[in-house]
Amino acid sequence: MIRPREPALLGALLLAASFLILETALSAGYFPVQADETTLAWAAKQVSLGRVPYADFFTIIPPLTLYGVGTFFKAAGASLGALRLLTLAWILLIALAQYGLLLRSAVPPRWAFLGALSFPSAFFPFWPLPSHHWFALGFGLLALFLCREGDVSRRRAVAAGALCGLSGLCLQTDGALFSALLSMRLLTSGAPGRDRRRGLLALSGALRWAWFDLVEWPARFYKQPGGFNDVNPFEFMERTVRTAVPDVWTPSSAAPLLTLAVAMAFPLLALVWPALAPEWRQGVLTSRWAYSSAALALTFALFLKGRPDWTHLVFLSPILLLFAAAAVDWKEERLRPLLLKAWLCAVLAVGLLRWPLAWVSAPPNALDVWAVDGMLKKYSVPALVDALPGVREGNLPVLYLARDGSTLYFYWAPVAPPMDWVLPPSARYNSPWEYEVLAAFAREHRVRYIVLRREEAASFREEPSPVATLLAEEYRFLSDTPYGVVLERNGHGPSPP
């Protein structure tokens, strides 16, 4: 029997438990700064300062994420701590949306609570990265929440379509996924397809560059054969099993094992889940079955088509649970609810074991989320700047060719570079156009120091590219620092011995 106030009380408990876990997961002591995080923060900071993305600087992050975080930075200040707090609030929104969707699918409130808690407690904290994935996921789940099964009005369909568009403006593929899921829901609900609305976003004179950065560039360069992002899903699974380690309490070791385990559930559910229902055995196929199975199959196909890694799987995990639970009649069936309960208990057992152990060694401290900026400013960025003679005194720009150059640029960028994520040509990530822009930037601003990530220094200097030509003709070796190989522009200072 469901008590009248039980769903509301469980919703409040969901927020409290999720906050306690998330503020620990996003703390500076638990999760170190990653390149993706500083890339997003750096680009949003440029927007907050008035620069136009796709025209004034290169990024493949869609506009809503940039302008949303950029607007937040204008109010809260540009800091990684602020970005982590914004991410925390957004994950709470995702948990509430998931809870509401599970309740709407007639899942008992206590199991809906546990299902919604699985994302903030078990999945997300293994890789708690501030990312445009999460913003896209929040808008997409809200779009699905607006579309009640069997009762999708014209107004709801238009609003849900707009939310799908917002999801796509945070991340293209995820917006496409939710648009497809919404379309299937509309088809099974009898709502006319003409109720779907699309918007066109034009940002002054940047529209042509937006098309290049968001559509043309990823299509031509993002997944080149043998490149940085060209991940074969089946080789990935095999490598996951071969390299996984027994220690399941750290993000780097636990993520591959959980990725493999959860990814295997997608095809299993899509193929077997409907056949476990009593109605299937009676030979009756309902629209709910068809919708849930198609959604699971589409979600798994997107996972294989993209990068089958932990971040992408975490994004898809609420959808996996949602459509698995929505296809179940919790009052009439026995087998499938039992399987879902067992799966949820196994997932949440990870959190029950993980977080008490983490809190014993490091008690929860919400203020620790802000400490990430102080740690970087104290131990990372100033040390790199001070290792280069005259940079601090002369307020000189520095060009850092690495995957995580945005950390330096976020805190130290007298002249903002045109991009913040650079890999050598052999990684097949950057286009020739980008190396030309970087070389032109170094010449135009007479950049005195270029720092090369140590493990990639030889690649940048030896593999043919406009950057390699620039380094050979205009720069010379200066020193080797903990942050990489430092090259100095010819004509500055004495020659090294």
Image (cartoon, rainbow, N blue to C red):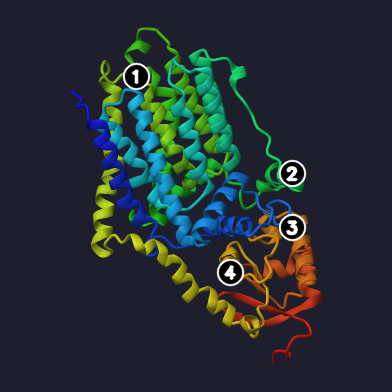
Q: Marks 4 and 2: CB-CB under 8 Å?
A: no
The amino acid marked with disc number 3 is Glu
**Residue 476 vertical placement versus 7 (above, below):** below
Q: CA distance from mark 4 to mark 2?
A: 29 Å
Q: Quadrant of residue 203?
A: top right
Question: Closer to the observer: label 4 or label 2?
Answer: 2
Q: Secondary structure at mark 2?
A: helix
Q: Residues within 10 Å of mark 4 (few under 14, many from 20)?
A: many
Q: Which residue is mark 3?
A: 434
- Labels 2 and 3 touching (C-beta < 8 A): no
Q: Earlier in the sequence, mark 3 or mark 1?
A: 1
Q: Is residue 113 above or below residue 360?
A: above
Q: Does residue 296 appear in this view?
A: no
Amino acid carrying mark 1 in the image: Leu
Q: Which residue is mark 2?
A: 207
In the picture of the structure, the residue carrying the numbered disc 1 is 276
Q: Is residue 347 above or below residue 244?
A: above
Dot 1: element: helix
Image mark for residue 168: none
Q: Is residue 422 left or right of residue 345?
A: right
The amino acid type of the residue labelled 4 equals Leu
Q: What crowding class fits label 2: few (fewer than 14 Cα within 10 Å), some (14-19), or many (20 or more)?
A: some
Chain-order first, disc 3 or disc 4: 4
Is residue 353 shown left or right of residue 214?
left
Q: What is the x, y in percent for residue 444?
A: 80, 70
Query: Earlier along the polypeptide chain: callout 2 or callout 1?
Result: 2
Please tell me the numbered disc located at residue 408.
4
Which quarter of the image is occupied by the C terminus? bottom right
Quadrant including the N terminus: top left
